[in-house]
Image: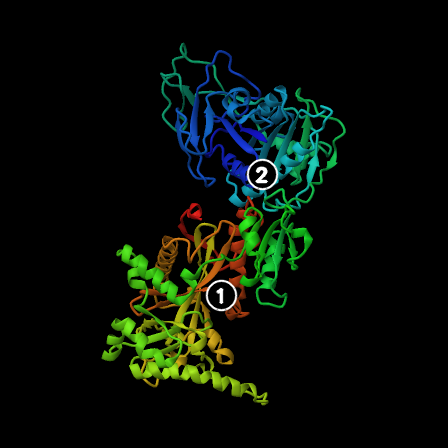
Amino acid sequence: MHVLVTNDDGPPGPDSPFVDYFINALKKYTDWDISVALPESQKSWISKAHVIGHTMTASYIAPSSTPGDPYEGPYYKKRNCGEEWVLLDGTPASCTQVGIHHLFKDKGPVDLVLSGPNFGRNSSALYILSSGTIGAALEGALCGLPSIGLSFAYNSRISAPEHTKAACWLSVRLVKYLYDNWPKDGTVDLYSINIPLHAELGVDTKIKYTHILENRWGSAFEYIEDTILNSPTGELVEVADQVQPEIDEESGKLQFRWKPNLKAVQDGVSEWPEGNDAWAIAQGHVSVTPLRANYQGVAGYAGELKLPSWPLWSSAPFAALITYPPTSYIYPLLASNIHRLLPNVKIVTDPKDPAIAEGSGVNVFHFAEYEDLNFERMIADREHYLTCSYIYRKALIRKNFLAHTIATYKAKHPGSILKKCFPESYELELDYAEYLDEMLDDIYEFRDQLIEGDSWWILKPSMSDRGQGIRIFHTMEELEEIFDSFEENDEEEEDEEDDDNDAVAPKSISESNGIVTSQIRFFLIQKYIRNPLLLESCGNRKFHIRTYVVASGALKVYVYRDMLALFALKPYSSPDSDSDLEAHLTNTCLQGDLKDEGSVRRFWCLEGFDKDAVWDQICRITSETFAAAVSLGRLHFQPLPNAFEIYGIDFLVDSDLNASILEINAYPDFAQTGNDLKQLVDGLFKSVLTEIVAPFFKGDVVQGGEQDDSGFGELALVLDQDVSGRW
């Protein structure tokens, strides 16, 4: 469907603040082919005029992808290098004429003319008969096309962007309904729509069929006395509050300036019976006025217009498939955000529900554990099936793969921030402790340092999570003891299974995080950061920063600003052979019943250091880490256009405020956030729904609910790299 958009306010700017938002909404909420032809400057109050004898000239502009930002141009030669709008030095009606018959022939015939949104109301006879917006729509009707004039009524010339977006969403929804239900008997040639801009505008706003208020007015001009004089060039010059020059009576001109009493016009609306367009706007309703191409109203249209249920971003039905148990930590957070932000979206819990089957035409957002996702559908149905995880991402989430990813990237990019923000690391592959000496021969650089005994090291099983199997050491003997203890764990666990005693005291971290070596072959050894940032206000306990990062499509990467600080159980002390892991390990999963109120805090509530400097490093490190992953090709990290994933990335800050990345976790354990800080996770899901899920299905959410009072509940874009062509 080919749609021509014009207006009487001209290109985006202070006098035309709505057109770019509206066209952006048309592109998001429909699959229409949009052509744009606008007057090069404001042409308000010009009605359906053409300027006889004037030769119009076309120019072009390249609109910004972000509504409200400046456009590029104008320029006179078409560049054909992206979206371009046409500007004409003519009237709105002339823009309609030339747009229909000349400018866009390569796109085929125009099916619908949309004029607006006008910067201000076009209600009552006084406005409509003079409106360039309605005049442009009337020209479209006289060319035999369905045409709609759209106007936004405001109480303040500066409108909040969320109000404008809400009005644009409602406009597209209403325009689509009117076009799809256009009378076949020829009774309606065009519609005039007025939408009031106010905070309550949304799905519950009433839409009223109305007729034109047939009002009248007095003088619309003011006689110019000596406060405004003619300059020698004939231009009007204001000289009020200045010394009055002498007036040459012989060369003086009789002049009048435009000065209608519009406030009196609007105040007079209350004197008329209900049902007219101006009355509807005054009540906060949307007015829809059917018209003939001679400005006459159409009989038989009255009362409220009820729009059918319509998803917020697509004409196709939409469902959120959530296969987490309703009793889980995240299910109620997801469900409540969907109900609040996406009221037209149905929540489904059964993946076999035929209503969401492949080929049903239903858009499906699937939030589930990795093994519950439909990978075949993910590949085959990329337009209608959006999932919460990529398929391949080992390059990031396995500790040994991450070390390899960063090492390879650093070798090719010696100036990268990753050069200094990832601890010195060595990969170790080991089936049984008895082969340790042989394996260390392959990483002799580490072995030599270990023999010297000057550094402390941390051992991490590559595929374990929740802190399992982490140990610190600084001698060969200690490393051997660690692996021997891992093999003893298997026998101890078998003995515990036979113990019938239900009264079990909480275990220490050392007692509760063992592993079985034969089940985990790959390990990562890293140099231990011995000078972590310690805060006296937090008891000098070591902490790491848990940052939620969202990778979307192929590929944008966002960092969620509201971060967590996770603290060790005990005050920090430099490591020694008898070190208590409870002072060194900050993973709260290991603390269990020992965790106290100070174990999890909001990062931005901490005091005593430059948090903005740390935040800046985290954003840069995250950006280059994902850039490193995609630079290695598709084998171990494959972003897909119809997937996103939330990662929990852990950072450690040292006493010099240098941030280091420790690990990246897929499917982070949100429950460790606890109930006191649940609003942080709630804000994350809200951001994902509004900024990731909704735009995927051609739109954005216009009713976002209440904002997080902290001011930090937002996603910061740190990487925008198109890698879709690689797959």
Can residue 369 be seen here?
Answer: no
Q: Residue at left 58%, top 35%? A: 152
For disc 2, the marked residue is 30
- Local crowd at mark 1 within 10 Å, few (<14), some, or many (≥20)? some
What scheme was used to colour the molecule?
Answer: rainbow
Judge from the rendering whether residue 187 lies leftward or rightward of residue 131; answer left or right. Answer: right
Q: Is residue 479 above or below residue 604?
A: below
Q: Which residue is at the front of the view, 672 or 533?
A: 672
Label 2 amino acid? Thr
Judge from the rendering whether residue 76 lies leftward or rightward of residue 272; answer left or right. Answer: left
Q: Which residue is at the front of the view, 369 or 611?
A: 369
Number of the label disc, if any, that sits on residue 289: none
Can residue 274 be seen here?
Answer: yes
Name the spot of residue 571 as percent of width and height, x first: 38, 79
Secondary structure state at the residue bearing disc 1: loop
Secondary structure state at the residue bearing disc 2: loop
Q: Which residue is at the front of the view, 528 or 151?
A: 528
- Determine the image quadrant of residue 481: bottom left
Q: Is residue 76 above or below residue 161?
A: above
Point out the residue furthest to the top here.
Answer: 250
Circle count: 2
Name the spot of residue 411 as percent of width and height, x first: 28, 58
Label 1 amino acid? Pro
Q: Earlier in the sequence, mark 1 or mark 2?
A: 2
**Distance between the alpha carbons at the discs numbered 1 and 2:** 36 Å
Q: Which residue is at the front of the view, 493 or 562?
A: 493
Number of the label disc, if any, that sits on residue 668: 1
Judge from the rendering whether residue 120 lies leftward or rightward of residue 394; answer left or right. Answer: right
- Local crowd at mark 2 within 10 Å, few (<14), some, or many (≥20)? some
Instruction: Name the image quarter holding the N terminus.
Output: top right
- Is disc 1 in contact with disc 2, using a CB cutoff of under 8 Å? no
